[in-house]
Image (cartoon, rainbow, N blue to C red):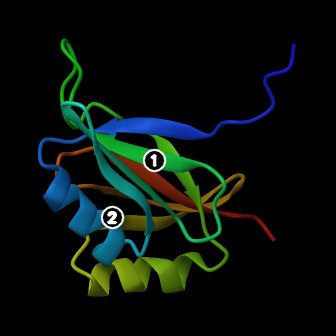
Amino acid sequence: MTINQLLTMTVFVSDQDRAKAFYAEQLGFDVRADRVVGDNRWLEVAPPKSETSIVLHRPFPGSTAGSTQGVILGSDDLDADCAALVDAGVAVDGPDDMPWGRQATFSDPDGNGFVLTEAAR
């Protein structure tokens, strides 16, 4: 087997412009691509140091915006990141102590759910 990495994951959003603003301005993600491909728009964002990116895409037939849950994002300073998210207008639940470290959760404007985690020290 030669599969050796996860390049992108798709998150379905109802409004790509609104999603771009949320991910870039409120989460601080880099916009790695934003171009029209046929009838679709390829909108790719990622945390600044991440090799894996997220494609913010209109739902495919049979899919719905907001259906992604449990995407885990890493943090080196969970308290500071949660404070920055709240300051940017993001509703954050946590941080909470867990057996493996600490985590907080938040959602994008469509309800796609994310877990921001910091490993135990």
Q: Residue at x 12, y 48 (%)?
A: 15
Question: Where does label 1 land, which residue?
Answer: 54
Q: Nearer the viewer, residue 84 or 54?
A: 54
Point out residue 73 in the picture as x, y percentages from the top left corner.
55, 56
Taking the image as drawn, is residue 69 in sight?
Answer: no
Identify the image quadrant of residue 20. bottom left
Q: Would residue 79 be found to the left or right of residue 75 on screen?
A: left
Circle 1 — which element? strand
Q: Nearer the viewer, residue 69 or 19?
A: 19
> Which amino acid, by three-letter code, is at mark 2?
Tyr
Identify the image quadrant of residue 59. top left
Q: Quadrant of the N terminus?
A: top right
Taking the image as drawn, is residue 88 in sight?
Answer: yes
> Which amino acid, by three-letter code, is at mark 1?
Ile
The image shows residue 56, relative to residue 95, as above or below, that is above
Q: Would residue 15 be found to the left or right of residue 11 on screen?
A: left
Point out residue 74 in the picture as x, y percentages from the top left corner.
62, 61
Q: How many marks?
A: 2
Answer whether labels 2 and 1 touch (C-beta < 8 Å).
yes
Question: Where does label 2 land, which residue?
Answer: 23
Q: Nearer the viewer, residue 94 or 12?
A: 12
